[in-house]
C-alpha cells in the first residue's frame, strides 16, 4: 500500500471538495510531513540524532496511522514549541491541520474507529490589532507613486489605488481580467473560489482609465485578458506586486519592513470604518469575510479616538483645584465658588 495514499487523498479532498487554495494545501502537506517525520524519529531509534528532513516516512501506512494517540499529538506540539520555537499561531495552525486530517481519516476514509485529535486543544492566541497606514501616509504613498518617473508608474499607481480603496487581497488583484470590469463594478475571485463584487469609486475609475490607455495592446501580450501585465506581456505575479508595493513604500519614506500588500488591505478597511462610518456588516461584505468576527478586528479605536472620546465627556471641563481668580464665562474674573458650580 502506498504510504502516502491517505495523505494525498486528504489533500485532494481539501483542494477539490472544500476548495482550499493551493497555498493552504501546501501548508497542510508541510505540517503533515513534519509530524510524520517527527513521530517516525521518536519511535525508531535508528533515526535519533539525525536531521528531521532526512527521516524516511515510507513506514507511515494504515497500521501506523491507527497506532497514533493523543499523547503523540501533544508531544509533537511540544516539540514545535520548545525545539522549533513555534509561535502560538504556528502551533494553532499545525493543530488545525492534524485535527482536520484525523477527522478525515475517521469520517471519510473510515480507517480509524476513534479520532486521536478530538480532545486536542488549540493554544490561546493573542489577537493583535492590524497594522495599517494612516490617512496622511496613504495619501503620501499615492502621491509619491503618481509623481514617480518609473517606467510602470501608471500601472503601479493603479495597483496601489485599488489596494487602498477596495481592500482586496493580493491574489484577488493579480487574478483580475479585463472581463471582470463592468462599468463601476469589479468581480474578484476570493477565498474558497467565491466571487464577490467590488464597487469602484471615482479614484479607482480614474486610475483604471489611465492604465488602460497605456496598457500594451492585446496582440503584444502573452495573456491578453490579464488586467495587470509585465513588460514581458505576462500576467503580473504576486511576487512582482509585492516588489512594487515595497519599492513604493520606500520611495514614500515608509518602512517596507513594517508594511505589505496585506497591510494595505488593513489600511483600506480601517479608513473605511474610521472615516466612512461603514457598518460592520457592510465592511464584512466588502472584504469578503465569511464571519463577521473576522471583520470585527477593524472596529478597534486608535489613540486619537481615545483622546477625543475622553475630551468629549461632559465632565471634562470641570475643575477641582481652587483658583482665587478663575475666569468667568464672559472673560472677567470670577469667584472660586462660581467656578465650582459650573459644568
Image (spheres, rainbow, N blue to C red):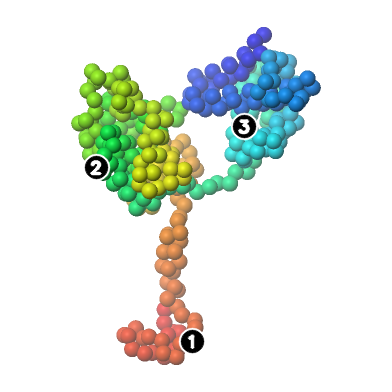
User: Do residues under tags 1 and 3 come within 8 Å of each other at their CB atoms?
Assistant: no
Q: Earlier in the sequence, mark 2 or mark 3?
A: 3
**Element marked by disc 2:** helix
> Which quadrant holds the C terminus?
bottom left
Query: What is the number of the mark on residue 94?
Result: 3
> Which quadrant holds the N terminus?
top right
Q: Can residue 287 be seen in this view?
A: no
Q: How far apart are the two marked residues, 2 and 3, measured between alpha carbons?
A: 43 Å
Q: How far apart are the two marked residues, 2 and 1, measured between alpha carbons?
A: 56 Å
**Element marked by disc 1:** loop
Query: What is the number of the mark on residue 202?
Result: 2
Q: Which of marks 2 and 1 is nearer the N terminus?
A: 2
Query: What is the number of the mark on residue 322?
Result: 1
Check the image and report above or below for 247 versus 57: below
Q: How far apart are the two marked residues, 1 and 3, measured between alpha carbons?
A: 62 Å
How many numbered circles does the render carry? 3
Q: Is residue 165 visible?
A: yes
> What is the quadrant of residue 44 in the picture?
top right
Residue at 46% across, 27% down: 192
> What is the quadrant of residue 179 in the picture?
top left
> What is the quadrant of residue 181 in the picture?
top left
User: Do residues under tags 2 and 3 come within 8 Å of each other at their CB atoms?
Assistant: no
Residue at 21% across, 30% down: 214
The spot of residue 34 in percent (x, y) is 65, 26
Query: What is the number of the mark on residue 32?
Result: none
Amino acid at each position: 500500500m502506498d504510504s502516502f495514499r491517505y495523505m494525498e487523498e486528504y489533500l485532494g479532498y481539501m483542494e477539490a471538495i472544500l476548495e482550499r487554495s493551493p497555498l493552504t494545501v501546501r501548508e497542510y502537506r508541510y505540517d503533515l510531513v513534519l509530524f510524520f517525520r517527527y513521530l517516525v524519529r521518536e519511535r525508531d531509534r535508528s533515526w535519533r540524532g539525525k536531521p528531521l528532513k532526512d527521516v524516511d516516512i515510507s513506514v507511515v501506512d494504515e497500521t501506523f496511522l491507527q497506532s497514533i494517540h493523543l499523547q503523540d499529538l501533544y508531544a509533537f506540539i511540544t516539540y514545535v514549541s520548545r525545539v522549533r520555537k513555534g509561535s502560538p499561531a504556528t502551533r494553532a495552525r499545525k493543530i488545525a491541520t492534524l485535527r482536520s486530517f484525523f477527522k478525515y481519516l475517521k469520517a471519510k476514509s473510515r480507517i480509524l474507529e476513534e479520532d486521536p485529535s478530538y480532545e486536542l486543544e488549540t493554544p490561546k492566541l493573542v489577537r493583535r490589532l492590524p497594522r495599517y497606514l494612516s490617512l496622511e501616509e496613504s495619501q503620501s504613498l499615492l502621491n509619491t507613486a503618481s509623481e514617480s518617473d518609473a517606467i510602470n508608474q501608471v500601472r503601479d499607481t493603479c495597483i496601489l489605488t485599488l489596494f487602498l480603496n477596495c481592500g482586496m487581497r493580493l491574489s484577488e488583484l493579480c487574478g483580475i481580467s479585463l472581463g471582470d470590469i463592468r462599468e463601476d463594478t469589479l468581480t474578484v475571485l476570493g477565498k474558497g473560489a467565491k466571487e464577490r463584487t467590488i464597487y469602484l469609486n471615482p479614484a479607482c475609475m480614474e486610475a483604471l482609465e489611465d492604465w488602460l490607455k497605456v496598457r500594451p495592446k492585446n496582440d503584444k501580450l502573452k495573456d491578453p485578458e490579464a488586467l495587470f501585465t509585465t513588460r514581458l506581456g505576462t500576467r503580473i505575479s504576486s511576487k512582482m506586486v509585492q516588489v512594487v508595493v515595497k519599492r513604493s513604500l520606500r520611495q514614500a519614506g515608509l518602512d517596507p519592513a513594517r508594511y505589505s500588500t496585506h497591510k494595505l488591505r488593513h489600511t483600506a478597511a480601517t479608513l473605511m470604518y474610521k472615516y466612512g462610518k461603514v457598518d460592520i456588516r457592510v465592511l464584512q461584505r466588502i472584504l469578503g469575510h465569511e464571519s463577521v468576527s473576522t471583520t470585527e478586528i477593524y472596529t478597534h479605536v486608535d489613540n486619537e479616538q481615545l483622546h477625543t472620546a475622553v475630551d468629549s465627556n461632559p465632565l471634562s471641563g470641570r475643575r477641582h483645584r481652587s483658583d482665587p481668580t478663575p475666569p468667568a464665562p464672559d472673560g472677567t474674573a470670577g469667584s472660586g465658588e462660581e467656578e465650582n458650580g459650573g459644568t
